Amino acid sequence: MGNAYDIIVVGARVAGSTLAYLLAKEGYKVLLLDRGTFPSDTLSTHNMYSNSLGMLRGLGILDAVLETATPLYRRARVDFDGAIIDGIFPESDGLQGCLCVRRKYLDTILFDNAKAEPGVTAIEGFRVTSLIVENGIVKGVEGKRKDGDGEVERFTAHLVAGADGRLSKVREWAGSERKIVVPTDFASYVAYVTNFEQAGEIHVEFYKSKDKLAIVFPTSDNQYVLGVMFPLTDNAWMARFKASPEAGIRDLIDEGFAHTTLADRFRKAEFAPSESVKGLHGYDNDWFVGMGRGWALLGDALSFKDPAVGQGMHDALYGAHMLAEILSQYAAQDWQDNWESMGAVYQSAMEAKLMSRFWMGCQFTKNVPVPPEVTAAYHLVGQDAQATEVFLGVYNYVSEPEHLHEEIGRLINRVGSA
């Protein structure tokens, strides 16, 4: 194995493995590194809408993902402080359905798909410890193998791509500028449960009740994944969750969502015995500069948004496609003459596509009361089939937020003229 590559991708989960595969298909020599090994899990809401499934189909792995023990679902039931929106996600890319597949399955499929592509060298259990920088330009990485003797290995490339997550070290070492930061007001906990019952067609459930949120997705292995959020400043709830996360979740749903059917149904559910409850005490919704001299960022390393909107894996897939498209316009040795122009195109394209959903996430991430007029608008949306479809279509990009605003305007005008 040689030590020189066209591109080194640090992080081999959704964003990284996708980028490695796409660039290898274009004829580039790729080194794909991850500090972990596969199969393995990672903290994630791991939901994908039909537009993401379309990208998996383009990668040639949709059938393999559908063969995991994960059910497709089409329906969503949303409860915004008593305003109910219940409907079916619209079709996109000839696909209808959403999939909340466990990361231990999805990431392994993506990694194996990349690893099998000629042109990709993949190393698991490799921890990158620093970037190689010459005259202000990133030229490669240094690191150590988990199962090695401690020897530092060096690999060089024309570009190092950081797909290493929300707390990206590549981003830190490269000195990428943070353009936007919106700290969350919430603590989040995620658990896997069995024996959870739903009425009718399986679906995602989303609840916002005053200063608490709960989300339930049907996921792999006959389980449901549950996420709950409460204010970071609520010391009483924080103490209860730290003492016993499982008891904290049960109490929060019992007390915070007693007026819904969720509370009664969750009492009958059981925590999956082989899964631990995972918590996250605060995070930033942020955007960074995505490319510089010898480096680029994608996935959560480029932008992290509140998990309540379930867009992270879509953004990772989309970003990998966009970055691969931009890089493939040049031979690898010519990238060094085009950092500024490529970076401008990449930044502009990513922000144009994803920024509206970023700000959606920021609305959920702040602990502020929902204005009565917004709740009233959601009531109107939930009573209208067309508006409901447009609302749900925002999540899989069939519709845009401005289309929802137009629908709400139509409904308000109809009420005013009645």
Image (cartoon, rainbow, N blue to C red):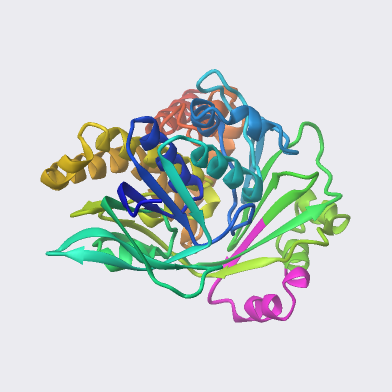
Residue 125 versus residue 73 in the image, above or below: below
The residue closer to the viewer here, 312 or 136, is 136
Which residue is at 50% across, 69% downward? 282
Which residue is at 26% across, 65% downward? 132
Q: Residue 374 vs residue 62: left or right?
A: left
The residue closer to the viewer here, 241 or 314, is 314
Whether residue 370 can be seen here: no
In reply to whether residue 71 is colored magenta, the answer given is no
Whether residue 130 can be seen here: yes
Which residue is at 64% across, 37% downward? 99
Q: Residue 88 vs residue 326: left or right?
A: right
Tell me residue 107's x, y (percent).
Answer: 57, 46
The residue closer to the viewer here, 401 or 349, is 349
Q: How many marks?
A: 0
Q: Which residues are magenta?
A: 227-248
The residue closer to the viewer here, 201 or 315, is 315
Residue 337 versus residue 67 in the image, above or below: below
Tell me residue 272's x, y (percent).
Answer: 81, 58
Tell me residue 364's x, y (percent).
Answer: 49, 55
Tell me residue 173's x, y (percent).
Answer: 29, 68
